[in-house]
Amino acid sequence: MVTVKPEPAVTPEITTKPGITDGADEAEPGVGLPLVGELRLNLSALGVDGSAPDFGERLCQLSSDNHPYDFQYSAQGELIVMPPTGFESNIGETEINIQLGIWRYSNGGMSSSQTSLFRLPSGAAFMPDAAWITQERFDNLTDLEMRGGVNGAPDFVVEVRSRSDRLPPLLTKMQEWMDGGARLGWLLDYRTRRVHIYRPGQAVEVLENPETLSGEDVLPGFTFEVRRLIFDRLNPAASE
């Protein structure tokens, strides 16, 4: 029997600016019901081994066969079914991937979008909205990693909050990326016009409506105009 684990109702601890809420329980206009987020199914209870060598490949195939849904896997043995994000949040994902791709043409390494899987030491297998790994790592990927998931977190990872994403699970996921070996992480939240920046061994830095973001020493020379490309396009009213 498959066990459905509902997401707990957790109140975010981050203080929001006047007039801007976290939006965790925000209803879709015209519907009157909260937006539906991810669904979690307990696969470990069914004896599914997420550590099997071919598990990542099978997980990628599952996502491919069930487009537009994405399937990820938690360290607790849960299959995470991610609903379509729609054009709104996809704009943010597309913009960061375009700019990251342009940068790596001149600087090397390999960038990837929402369909690339990374397997963390914890056992979790996630697909970030945008990611980049060094050229050395890319050149040494095995055939199995190319087909079914890269071992370890990306060197640089980005998550873009969608309409249905609640903030606490995203913050937890970002910390999992860092614990798995990421060297720089961004959580882009256009609903509050905030950016959460993650660095190994440091406290999370929260920027309020920044104009640009820097790739720092992980992506030297990379600058992303987050306000113009994402915040002003997807949440212009909050800037007034």
Image: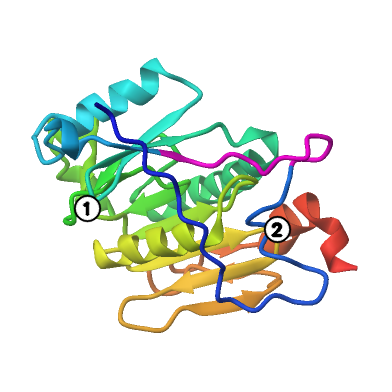
Q: Residues within 10 Å of mark 2 (few under 14, many from 20)?
A: some
Out of 61 and 182, give the one closest to the viewer. 61
Residue furthest toward the bottom? 202
Out of 214 and 196, give the one closest to the viewer. 196
Q: Quadrant of residue 58?
A: top left
Q: Quadrant of residue 71?
A: top left
Out of 168 and 113, give the one closest to the viewer. 168
Q: Secondary structure at mark 1?
A: loop
Q: Say which amino acid is labelled 2.
A: Arg
Q: Secondary structure at mark 2?
A: loop
Q: Say if 57 sits above or below 184 in the image.
A: above
| The stretch drawn in magenta includes residue 141 | no
- Residue matched to label 1: 120
13 left or right of 183 in image: right
164 left or right of 132 in image: right
Quadrant position of the N terminus in the picture: top left
Residue furthest toward the right? 240
Pointer 1 or 2: first along the chain:
1
- Residue matched to label 2: 191
6 left or right of 235 in image: left
Q: Which residues are magenta?
A: 28-39
* Residue found at x 73% / y 45%: 27
Instruction: Give how far across and how far down residue 63 sits, in percent.
Output: 37, 25
| The stretch drawn in magenta includes residue 30 | yes
Q: Residues within 10 Å of mark 1 (few under 14, many from 20)?
A: many
Instruction: Give how far across and how far down residue 168 sits, in percent.
Output: 49, 63
* Residue found at x 57% / y 45%: 93
Instruction: Give how far across and how far down residue 150 sits, in percent.
Output: 22, 43
